[in-house]
Amino acid sequence: MKKRKGFKILFGFVVFTGVLAAVMLFSPLFLISDIHVNDLSKYTAEEIIRVTGLEKDENVMYYMGGSLRNVLQLRMGKAESRVENLPWVRTAEVQYLFPGTVQITVTERNAIAWVRYMANYLLVDEEGYVLEVSSSIDDRYPEIRGVQLDKFSVGKKIVAQKPEKIDWLVQLLQSLEQVDQSPHHKLGEVLDWVDFLQDKELFLSLDSRITAKLELDDDLTYRLSYLKELYYNYIKPEEKGMIDFFDKKYARFIVE
């Protein structure tokens, strides 16, 4: 009796689910009439919509899925994955909103430095993801030296001969991003290059006239902030020299 009762419950659930799915597939409530995309700097709304594969006047249920959570939230997992495969995209959310609207919300990656690979330069974000490839660099972003790469793919994280150097690179890039959160006096705007030396040391150049050597440790963000403070508030525009961090917390400027 218990088995028969359980079978009836299961059968009833399957029938109910099938009927519900049929109603949703043929209901005009689930037809896509509008597709909205938030403002982006690297892609147009048309480019994003094209990548998703979404079409107006189609039933949104054809695009639903990816996971049970996506279904319950009326999100389109496959469309999100397609958008997230774009090099400049960090995250994407594609959600159906009643009645008839699909909202696409994209978070873009922020370029922060160039890394050399053979005869090319890779533009990377603070996590080490490759955004662009160029045969030359410009002064928009500093160059990172001393990291020997094995391979790369646009839109993927770079791979190095020494994996720990990727961790160091990410630490440096994240510290630079944190230091430059203020809209004024950005360190990245005057940073020419950073060279990875041995034993987790960094050698860097500012404005082609100031050099500095820093330890790559937990205090890196503090030292970079200190470096920025010295450069913008204490060193004269015509001065050249070296910034010496003579202990864990303090630095001095040695004029040439």
Image: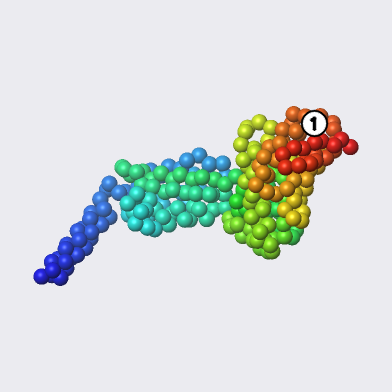
Horizontal arrangement in the rendering, residue 213 relative to residue 131 (left or right): right
Horizontal arrangement in the rendering, residue 184 relative to residue 146 (left or right): left
Identified at 36% across, 47% down, the residue is 96
Identified at 19% across, 58% down, the residue is 16
Is 211 located above or below residue 154 in the figure?
Answer: above
Residue 160 position within the rendered picture, expressed as x and y whole percent measured from the top left? 67, 61
Horizontal arrangement in the rendering, residue 229 relative to residue 38 (left or right): right
- Judging depth in this view, the residue of 124 and 46 nearest the camera is 124
Residue 172 position within the rendered picture, expressed as x and y whole percent measured from the top left? 67, 48
Q: Is residue 105 visible?
A: yes
- Judging depth in this view, the residue of 145 and 66 nearest the camera is 145
Q: How is the image coloured?
A: rainbow
Horizontal arrangement in the rendering, residue 234 relative to residue 65 (left or right): right
- Judging depth in this view, the residue of 250 and 142 nearest the camera is 250
Q: What amino acid is labelled 1 in the image? A: Ile
Q: Where, by quadrant of the figure, is residue 248 drawn?
A: top right
Toward the front, the furthest residue is 247
Residue with the mark numbered 1? 235
Tag count: 1
Quadrant assignment for the N terminus: bottom left
Mark 1 Cα-neighbour bin, 10 Å: few <14, some 14–19, many ≥20: some
User: Under tag 1, what secondary structure?
Assistant: loop
Residue 114 position within the rendered picture, expressed as x and y whole percent measured from the top left? 70, 50
Quadrant assignment for the C terminus: top right
Q: Is residue 194 visible?
A: no
Toward the right, the furthest residue is 256
Q: Where, by quadrant of the figure, is residue 149 drawn?
A: bottom right
Identified at 44% across, 48% down, the residue is 93
Identified at 72% across, 53% down, the residue is 200
Residue 6 position within the rendered picture, expressed as x and y whole percent measured from the top left? 16, 66
